[in-house]
Image: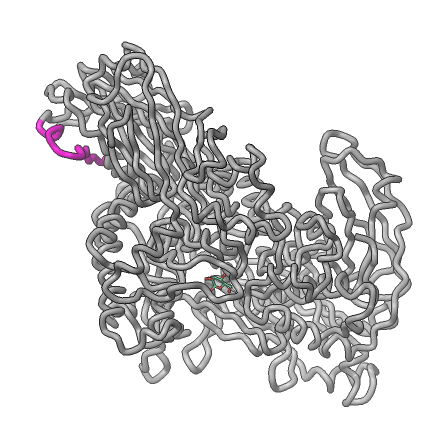
Amino acid sequence: MYISFIILILLNFSKCHGLDRLNLGGFWRLNGTNQEHKILNATVPGGIFSDLLLNKIIEDPLYDENDQKYKWVGESDWIYYRNFTVPESMLGYNNINIIFEGLDTIASIYLNGIHIGNTSNMFVRYIFDVKHVLSLGTNQIEILFTSPVQMGKKLANDSLYPIPPQCPPNDYRGECHVNQLRKMQASFSWDWGPAIASMGIWKDVYLEGSNSSVIRYVVVELIEDSANDLWNVKSKTYLSKTSGTKADDTKIIYRIEADFHTNLIFVEDVNGTIFDLDEPVIENTVQVSKNVVKRWWPNGYGEQNMYNFNVSIISPGGNDTFIQRIGFRTVELVQEEIKGSKQEKWGNTFYFKVNGIPIFAKGSNYIPSSILPEKGQDKKLIDSILQTARDSNMNMLRVWGGGIYESDYFYQRTDELGIMVWQDFMFACALYPTREEFLENVRSEVNHQVKRIASHPSIVLWAGNNENEAAITGNWYRSNGKQIYNDDYKKLYKQTIRTEFQKLLEGGIFLLSSPSNGIKTDEDGGISKNPYDLRYGDDHTYIYALDGFNPNIYPIPRFSSEYGFQSYPAYSSLKKSTSNESNLVIGSSFLEGRQHHPLGDLEMTLLISYQFQLPPRNNANYTRVFIYYSQVYQAAAIKTETEHYRKYRSILNLDGTGLTMGALYWQLNDVWLAPTWSGMDVTGKWKILQYLIRDAFAPLITVGQLTPYGSLDLTIVSDKTVLTDATLSVEVFKWNSFTPIAKIEKNVSMEATSSKTVMSMQTSEYLTELGCGQLSNAANNCFFTLNLLNGTTKLAPENFVFPKPLHDSNLQTPKIKITSVTTISSDKERRFKIVLKTSQIALFIWLECGEVTGKFSENGFHQITSTKTIYFETDGDISSEELRKTIAISNILSVSEMY
Ligand code: BMA
């Protein structure tokens, strides 16, 4: 084998011949098997709910109680069909395939009346040879979709033993047996979403004619060779099955468009015999000097440098070129043994190292951007969610296992934004069948999805499923003691998914489940007694009965990949969910119908009561107050929990817990207007959480937390990669004055990527000394502010410690008003300056401007100075006077009745 290496030569091989594609998307027809709905119009890519909406057969399924009303859609079968014209040029090719990038889910396909194939997995790309079925001129394609609801039922009936859970909890108002199907698991309902049993051609479909090999995937793994200052670019180029590309004079050419206009070009002759295989693959490693490329970094650590890696296959029959974007980075998941002072085993570390730097993972969990799979491909929608992640100082998102493997565009954007991806395989909260057909189906899914997306530098880890190990060990579905379920679990995740995964990626990082104990789970044979062991792997935590403002209630895991609290979306958003505003009352059957989390409202009420006083239920403003408090509570509790995890990045406790290195809260986004765990609602509006989490995820933070022993620990956390010299400034305020009564300063030298508790004080004693009151009530009268300064420059967001529950604190009722709104920029993106004046210290000030979309520079903030300036940006056409009139102001002692 020889590889020639040429620099700075441009070859013109991108123009393909011998290959043609005919897009079959666009206008289709649709038939219900129910004769009433004959001949409807359809759009491809699309889906049944979108199409019926366009045909005015149904209204928006996410509006009112339409999710319930339109269950018949998912219970029916549907036929999609169209005619298309095949030109002579297409028929001339040696190979003609029809390619479906995504069919949802159970379908039979007919071309000119001839059955060409069946599908049963929405995550698989289906390719059917149609060379002998096509004819010149008009052809007809017909796809029969079987109701996934009916198919789920049938498969469950046929199953030799039950595969639990058969149905979701009643509160979900969902469909049963989704675990029998390889389809988005959340499409049969979830605790944050409706049952929309989708069907359809959700991705592109096209005809492909070729005379030679077509490149299906290029999978790249980048391996650093430090000794030689090189990157090894290891690639596997997967080709189509062809008749034609047999000649020995076929070449493969790799081209990397590096820095300084350097094109690195590598050419290799390909041995003709490989083309006899079902899926020919060409493996190669080319070397790139480190001088000509820059590294890819996660958000917060450097630039997201990306390069084009072009692979071309050149043969007498024709050429094909595939462009794979790559980013040079190394990633490790470090799981090293931790030992106590007596050499006792304290578990393992669990953290990511990217380019040699230990990274604290900060982020959230991504659920599908739409419950309609076809809408979830929308670039604008993806942009707005991912930009929120980036703007919130996140560096990681977990693409959760009940949704979909996201679109190519999604991963392109996570690459560009520096958002690392923890990628689950799409299995969640259930046990799964292991009949051979099912396993074969899963193999195809793993095969396609890993090859499609694994080369993205942002994807750093793959996990077999969401919570299915926990479900077995925790006996969630009464599977306890039944060996068959344990065996099935191992068969699916270890023997099938992991085995398949490892065939494809040598250096891929794989966990069997989330949460799991990482490599300890393997030592335990694939199922640990307690997958939630804090000293190993990752953890999921939800605490709904204790006060989330108290940091001492939270566990101290190595990595928290899920934690969260519910809240309601803004009233102004909720209004968009119903035609009948009288539905929007907490406790109404409409809102109860959208609360899928059993006892969710009750839990929120309890949590709110730990800190705030809700008005009586018959108060006219009760719903708005409830919404606002639910958001404040969620935001402050998640902020507290996040800071708690970050605090432990360098702290190892005597019970072996600590060294926490990840905080991914549940959940980033939403699919409909309902009480859920999200930080942004489905209209794109940020809840209070989204503003507060940005501070909790800042590179440098101060954390003030009261210990169970009454002392206040002040900790600094630095994700910076350099030493930071700073002054920690602690001020004490009485609730009734803008002037602090005391200030302590301490110079600190913060080591790179570490956390350190730098000060500790007995809270009540200290506040008593300062004159806040008696030992028994001093903590009710005063609070702390924390700042990290370099001179007068703030290095970290200002932080606060409220030593008592807020309803026991001596807050004075503030009068807050806007003193001015001025236009700073009237470009397309308008920017306004807003000055607020308050008569008293005010907490969690929330500015709402109803229908006007936009973002405040800060919101949900505390005002401890009499005036404060903030900014508002909108693409709406609004004047400063109009904006001023629309802004409604709330704080914890008075909630606005507007919106
Ligand atoms: C986690 C997730 C989801 C769920 C969330 C909130 O366990 O994996 O299944 O939506 O909790 O309950």
Which is more toward the observer, 598 or 856?
Answer: 598
Classify residue 816 by image quadrant: bottom right
Query: What kind of colouring is applied to the model shown?
Result: one colour
Residue 276 among magenta residues: yes
- Total tally of numbered discs in the picture: 0
Q: Nearer the viewer, residue 463 or 746?
A: 463
Residue 441: x, y in percent?
26, 48
Extreme-top residue of the structure: 88
The single residue placed furthest to the left in the displayed view is 273
| Percent of width and height locating residue 828 | 72, 30
The answer to whether residue 9 is visible is: no
Q: Residue furthest front?
A: 35
- Whether residue 348 appears in magenta in the rendering, the answer is no
Residue 402 shows up from this direction: yes
Q: Is residue 791 left or right of residue 85?
A: right
> Is residue 498 found left or right of 47 in the rendered image?
left
Q: Give the image quarter of residue 313.
A: top left
Q: Is residue 889 above or below residue 738?
A: above
The quadrant of the image that shows the N terminus is top left
Residue 174 image offset from top left, x and y in percent:
48, 58
Magenta residues, start to end: 273-285
Is the residue 196 above or below the residue 786 in the image? above
Q: Residue at x 13, y 18 (%)?
A: 249
Task: Give the vertical position of 292 relative to 335 (above or below).
Answer: above
Task: Classify 700 as above or below 404.
Answer: below
**Image quarter of residue 734:** bottom right
Q: Position of residue 401 (x, y in %)?
A: 40, 55
Query: Does residue 717 appear left or right of residue 111 in this picture?
Result: right
